[in-house]
Amino acid sequence: MDDLKMQKQTLKKAYKKTKRKHITPWKILAIICAVVMIVSIPLSIFLQKFDNTVAAFVGGTFWNLQNEDPSAQYFTSDFDSAEEMVDYGLVLCQQVEAEGAALLMNNNNALPLASDAKVSTFSTSSANLVYGGTGSGNIDASSADTLRTALEKVGVSVNPTLWDFYTTGAAKDYTRSNSGTVATASATTAEAPWDIYTDDVKNSVTEYGDAAIVTLSRVGGEGADLAYGEVDYLTLDQNEKDMLSNLTEMKKNGQIKKIIVLINSANALQVDFLKNNEYDIDAALWIGDVGISGINAVAEILTGKVNPSGSLVDTYCYDNYSAPAMWNFTPVTYEGYVEGGDVPAKGSSYMIYQEGIYVGYKYYETRYEDFVTGSGNAGDYAYGDVVAYPFGYGLSYTTFTYSDMDVQYNAADDTYTVNVKVTNTGKAAGKETVQVYVQSPYTDYDKQNGVEKSAVSLVGFGKTAELAPGASETVSMTVNKRDIASYDTYGAGTYILDAGDYYFTAATDAHNAVNNILAAKGYTVASTSGKMTEDGNADLTYTWTEDALDTTTYATSENGAAITNQLSCADPNLYKGVDETVTWLSRSDWNGTLPTETVKLTLTEMLKKDLQDVRYDAADYESVDMPTLGAKNGVKLYDMIGLDYNDPKWDELLDQMTFDEMNSLIGDAFHWTMPVKSVEAPGTRDENGPQGLTASLLGSGKTQLTATAFTSEDVMAATFNTDLMTEIGKVIGNNCLNANIACLYGPGNNIHRTPYGGRNFEYYSEDGFLSGMMSAYEVKAIQDKGVHVVMKHFALNDCEQDRIGLGVWVNEQAAREVYLKAFQAPVEVGNANGVMIAYTRWGAVWSGGNYGLVTGILRNEWGCDGMVITDNVLTQYVNGPDGVMAGVSIYDAMMSFVTDTLPKYKNDPVIVTAMREACHHNLYAIANSCGMNGVGANTTIKVTRPMVVTMSIIIACASAFFCLLGIVMWIIGGIKFRKTEEYKAYKDFKKSLKAAKKA
């Protein structure tokens, strides 16, 4: 038995050794590669599907230039180095804050503080400022000064015990989160309760009692509006009230001398606590979101090194709910909507802009005038109980007077020149903003046809240089008469100029403007029994008369297109798919038309049809011939540089594109524009930028950009300084050029319809004219560096609630005069050549599918020939067919909805023709951008993939190949193994043993 056992072991050992030789290596290879394949193939599919996002996060590109021409630099930097550019941006951001911060109150000249003052900074926010909002516009302010370091740089001593209490002590647990991601809910106040302040902390204030500087911060962002229900985020919370109450006691006890409040918010804080000044506050300074270096300007303002000259871009109220828009700021579900029924979930809610044109000061100041004059059933309207600080308001450390107002009409270009002499009558040097307002007559024609008129509308502004005490400067401002015309939705269906008396006034703010015009009409405080808040100055007005109603002069745009109603689909009173009617707020009957509840809209068959994800039906369009595809004309995008959009050579170029190239260029553009080999068009890298260029939402350490994080846009607008806006645009343009960014998703041009808009920090103002004009100068300077801008979000993205799918119902006068006006001036004045389409529906129709909006107004009336991009395609109603038919040219598509959908229409000449025109717009924008730098006459494009995607494909393919090889060789090895002597000997031995056992 021992011999047999030894023989078996010997044969088995030889058997296993031979098996390992022929089978085991291939088996191991197959198993390992199978595991790698199971992981790598799905990963590779994922990376290819989201290659744009991946490349934005880890780096990479989709094209390379072959035979690059180093001398082909069509746009070059204004700076010798990135360091010089950064330093310039830091100084500029500080200057923006210096001229944008608005001094709201300064009792007994509490400010400026002494340069060697010893102060205590109160609130958790004092140690955790809001530098910018959250979401796609989030900025990196990690290197910015704190309030403490900024104050110390100007010589002020800051209470270290109190500071440590907020940063490392008990109060640090109450600090606001600094997450920069897209919000899912409103931020909440994060103030420390007074009962955790220790005696040591409270006693430390005595030594640093020259002033208590209280910072009240509020932050907004993409994804959520600010809370306004049971919790009102824009009012003081109990902990803030307790803190102020205790500071008041400290002041009474002599522990502190002054209480200074900093309002660090881009959303208008409800300042009811200042109405009766129950906390004995001495001064209040609005600073907005301060950006990378704005807090240094705030410190200089507090100590008098800088004289504040900012003017509010929103009306500041004692009661934020007094805005009529607040009655319609909560989305409402259509009557008859059933979840899972025949209306998509992203089409179930709506909001009615029932206030019409009466947004911000246009409501408060108009109702005030009607109250004073006894018109329009204004009721007992107590302006002073509602409005704390009017639009345009801002104090200075000096005083100014206006005089010698002169107005000249220039028939050649249909403009007015308004000149005003400004004199510094105080004791400190400073700058002053002059605001020009117009009042149009409110006529019987208007009342009969539903045309509304604001008591005053901003139509011009200018700012002095710094004036020494006693010095004067004549500020000259130009007013385009087109900005005086009103849109007549229900009558002429175009812009009109009424017959009657018109007034210009030069004013310090909107309320001052109304009072000046009232004075020109003979009203005084005395004659109105105190209804007027103060007497105006009739010398600062100019009056002229239009003899007849004019319905033709302004019925044609500056671009030469006829102006007619384009937005009836969003007006319940004109759209046939809504049975109900809406009463718009009217100054003809304030109390009778002021919204008190939301109008309920019921789903009809037509409304249901228009709310579907895709509305396109080929039967609705005339037949056209299929355009030429894939021609070999030898034209390159290089050949198109500088050519007019309508140059016939574009047809030769476009004929060369294939359908697949068009589909890729149009539908696959999430933060990138794809290259087009057939016309040798490079792709471009695109990024966000309302507060300046930023990649914070998607970027990693490898893809962060060298750029200036500016203040919030409202602070920019509050400077009323177009030269500064040009400089901002210059820096942003250079930042983009330095980072090889050819398209900027910004600036933001929506309206502060209410104080609670989540993205108000991305937008300039409650006023469309100011927003548009300030943006125009910024945009022009950005585009001068070869960066095409896509202003966002076109249009009506004035809230974040239900932003994906929300239907907004609005009349065309309000749409044009308030919400679209902010986009119009950048196109017509600043030559802006692109917009980003909002998710918002106009009534039932998605913004990008609204032909009247995109083609009728933006392209035809205004003359915008460039790129029209969607917001991130996160929903299927942002679709390819409806968009390209309406005038959308490219999709910011993280998901593949569009590139999956458009090929279904490959044989539809109507859609293919629209796709061709979309590519025309995109390639026109690229041809005239810095994306062409390096592209010469002999340069070609090599289409490629980001390295990480390429590697994933290689690994997936290699693992599949070697797994298959391993399996094949495993099988072959098994066959060979069975033919070996070792296999046969061992198997024969086992058979012999088995036979012996049977015997």
Image (tube, helix red, strand yellow):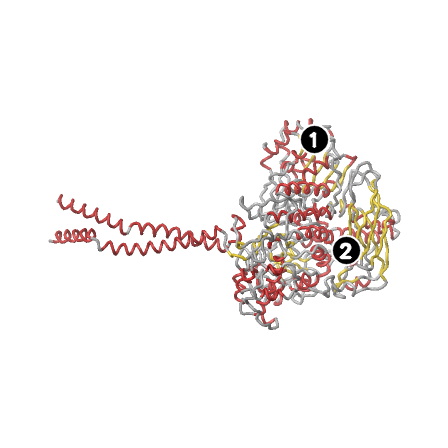
Distance of label 1 from label 2 (alpha carbons): 55 Å
Task: Kindly tell me whether residue 280 is visible in this rendering.
Answer: no
Decide if residue 971 is on the left or right side of residue 803: left
Q: Closer to the camera, 227 or 746? A: 746
Dot 2 corresponds to which residue? 591
Relative to 230, is 499 above or below?
below
**Where the N terminus falls, by quadrant?**
top left
Task: Identify the secondary structure beneath mark 1.
Answer: loop
**Residue 329: horizontal and vertical position, in percent?**
66, 53
Q: Which residue is disc 1 drawn over?
A: 155
Give the crowd class for mark 2: few <14, some 14-19, many >=20 residues within 10 Å. Answer: some
Image quarter of residue 206: top right
Give 807 or 305, whichever is nearer the viewer. Answer: 305
> What residue is drawn where x is 48% and y is 50%?
948
Please give left or right for residue 25 compared with residue 804 in the image: left
- In x, y percent, where is residue 193? 63, 35
Type of amino acid at the residue the image marks with label 2: Asn
The answer to whether one can see residue 729 in this image is yes
Q: Secondary structure at mark 2?
A: helix
Q: Nearer the viewer, mark 1 or mark 2?
A: 1
Pick whichever of labels 1 and 2 is earlier in the sequence: 1
Q: Is residue 573 above or below residue 684?
A: below
Q: Residues within 10 Å of mark 1 (few under 14, many from 20)?
A: some
In the picture, residue 884 is in which quadrant?
A: bottom right
Q: Nearer the viewer, residue 996 or 958?
A: 958
Residue most toward the left?
Answer: 999
Specify the amino acid type for callout 1: Gly
Q: Nearer the viewer, residue 905 or 376?
A: 905
In the visual, does 198 lie left or right of 522? left
* Quarter residue 67 falls in: bottom right
Tell me residue 51's x, y (percent).
51, 53
